[in-house]
Amino acid sequence: MTDEPAERADTPPDAVELLQSYLSSSPARRLAAFGDLVRHLQAAVGEQRQELAAGLLRRVPVPGLDYTAARGLAEIYRRLCAAGAASGKGMRLAVLGGFTTEQLTELIGLFSFMRGASVEVYRAGYGVFRQEILDPSSPLGRFCPDMIFLATSWHDLARRPGPGDEDSRVEELLEEELADWLGLWQRAHEQLGCQVIQSNFAPPPWRPLGNHEARQRAGFGRFVASLNALLQDRAPVFVTIHDVAHLAAAAGLWTWSDPRYYHLAKMPCAPELLVDYADSVAALVGARLGLSKKCMALDLDNTLWGGIIGDDGLEGIRLGPGEPEGEAFSEFQAYLKQLRERGVLLAVCSKNSEQVAKAPFEEHPDMVLRLEDICCFTANWNDKARNLRGIARQLNLGLDSFVLVDDNPAERALVRRALPDVAVPELPADPAGFIRAIEAHRYFEVLSLAPEDLARTDYYRANAARAQAESSYDDLDGFLRSLAMKGRSAAIDRGSLERSAQLINRANQFNLTTRRYAQADLAVLMEDEGWVTQCFWLSDRFGDNGLISVVLAKLEGEHLEIDTWVMSCRVFQRGMERFVLAKLLDIAAEWEVTAIHGEYLPTERNQLVRDLYRDFGFEQTYRGEDGGSRWRLGLPAGGVELGCFIEDESDG
Amino acid sequence: MDDLLAQLQELFRTVFDDDQLILRREMTVNDIEGWDSLRHVDLIIATEAHFRVRFATAEVARLAERDQNIGTFLELIGDKLS
């Protein structure tokens, strides 16, 4: 029972029924169910109900789609594009192929749309990827891509060792081959400034040397494997290596390669696997656009362990060694733990009393996941949709950041209907198949990993603890004092450069002037004696908030001009602004300037700091019609309120 | 219209995205708009998947030639199914 008005689903019941019916159909029924779904989609498009068709199309799961079905959906997507109804986060993608890329490109466009992107594609002619990049007058340049995808296969390798080649000769060939690719990427990056996705190389499935192929450096199999390793190690930061070798291995090398289709149409793999190939690229496009999922909401009974904790108790649930099904659940938990360690959030969403639900996490010896791995633990008797909305609110994430993992088909259907934005993968009845069922969707693709990602769960847990503490205080001062906050200030250096640039470029609310600086530009200011570039950290008894404020100020003769001041929204209303200003006053005193000048440039998002300088006692020297303002604080400043509950831990 | 032809007509309708398409035995590559090499590949893929047959490399290439028509295509499928 929800106490909120009926959720506006963007697809009416009959369309959801068709989708549901397709998802839960048996293999025998599958084709017919899919046919019904496609006809419904086509009808919707034909009747000008494009929004509806687009919404439904986005929810068709990709795993399990065969080639012909996917091409059918691509047709529908094409019509939606023509009608202007295929919206999403924009991206210009250039596909440059060494093999035939027409079908692959269509599918990449479709699957990117299904992940929330709207990709405009430029597809180069067959086999001319080198020329397109090297020739400055090629159409590629005029297209201005955000991303280039190099669709290459082992046929595109310019060199291969001969059987009698010495190890040193093989090394030479590897370095030469690598140098060619490096040169191509460098050229693309210089001309176009965009991200490059380079496919690595799946080896042919045959091994003339049999088992010895992997040992013999001059064997082609070994050569390809060595090259792939070099690609991963030596690719510059603007290149992402698309792991086709893994796609092929996962499919099975013989299943992957269908020589007939290479001979007939220069297709890189069996057509059925082109679907997986395209989805793999679409997941990278999605990752680039920030569309990857962020949180898994986990059911407990028969999802994390076998059995029902409320009925079976700690001794009765099936988990851990000694029982095959128990081992399957342990392995699933270990997989989830690895996801959480790399920055995916895990939440619990279970129909159980909280105490009973927490017991295994606290006491069962074979639980791999513990409470510290869970950023939000929701166990009650409310319906899942309501609980998921609550979790989303608490974590301050959109519902479209969530994946629901639940063994119960009825619960899955309920959430799909009530919350169309939440991803709900089908799970097999056998827990040994859970990992594969989830992996198939590529929900959590990333292009790189930062320390912030690794600490993400800790940050959310600390914030939850803070919120709870705050609710137990009547006065703000009492709460702030209880936090035992410690602040630190330092000049920006190599170590803090990346995070400082990130903050400058992402902060919207606490941002006085919204000037954006590329990391390279910030590095220049960092070295400039005429600039003060200061960054700030804040921690408290619950945890470390990390680097949360940056100030860039220019020395202009007798005064210090604050060019940029940003602060992370994580630490609003803790007194950090006063800490920062106190530091600025110290720095101003060191430089013996007579005043500090500040500026406020209004945007849609930074109303928060409109009166910041006024509140500190700065004098307004200018006021513009657009709401912009300039301010001055004469030094030495008397009467500026700088007291805060933050202890200074800075060096020196 | 016999069953095999009916099934093949369905496949053509899906691949060519034309639910009005009528297939006749005499029709060749030239008689259906949009039947280029790319569509030919899609057709072969759909046919192999639906009938659970496998065409040899040469058979696929041959099917696109001028003296072949739907009739010969159906014969080939029929042979593989028997």
Image: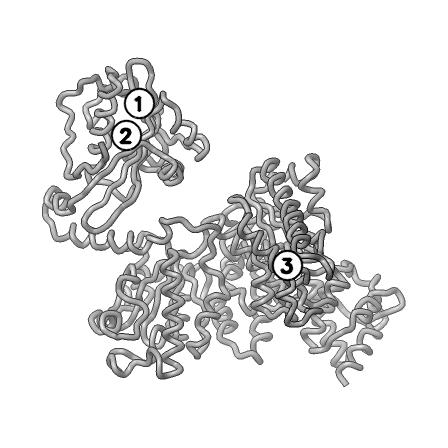
Please provide percent x and percent y for residue A96: 66, 49
Amino acid tagged 3:
Val
Q: Residue furthest top?
A: A557
> Would residue A634 be found to the left or right of residue A60 on screen?
left
Q: Which mark is residue A610?
A: 2
Q: Nearer the viewer, residue A610 or B9?
A: A610
Q: Secondary structure at mark 3?
A: helix
Mark 3 closeness class: few <14, some 14–19, many ≥20 residues within 10 Å: many
Q: Are marks 1 and 2 on the same chain?
A: yes
* Mark positioned earlier in the residue sequence (3 or 2): 3
Q: Nearer the viewer, residue A94 or A196?
A: A196
Which label sits in the foreground, 3 or 1?
3
Task: Identify the residue position indicated by label 3 in the image.
Answer: A224
Q: Measuring 56% from the left and 38% from the top, which residue is drawn there?
A: A193
Is residue A46 at all visible to an observer of this figure? no
Please provide percent x and percent y for residue A438: 46, 67
Mark 2 closeness class: few <14, some 14–19, many ≥20 residues within 10 Å: many
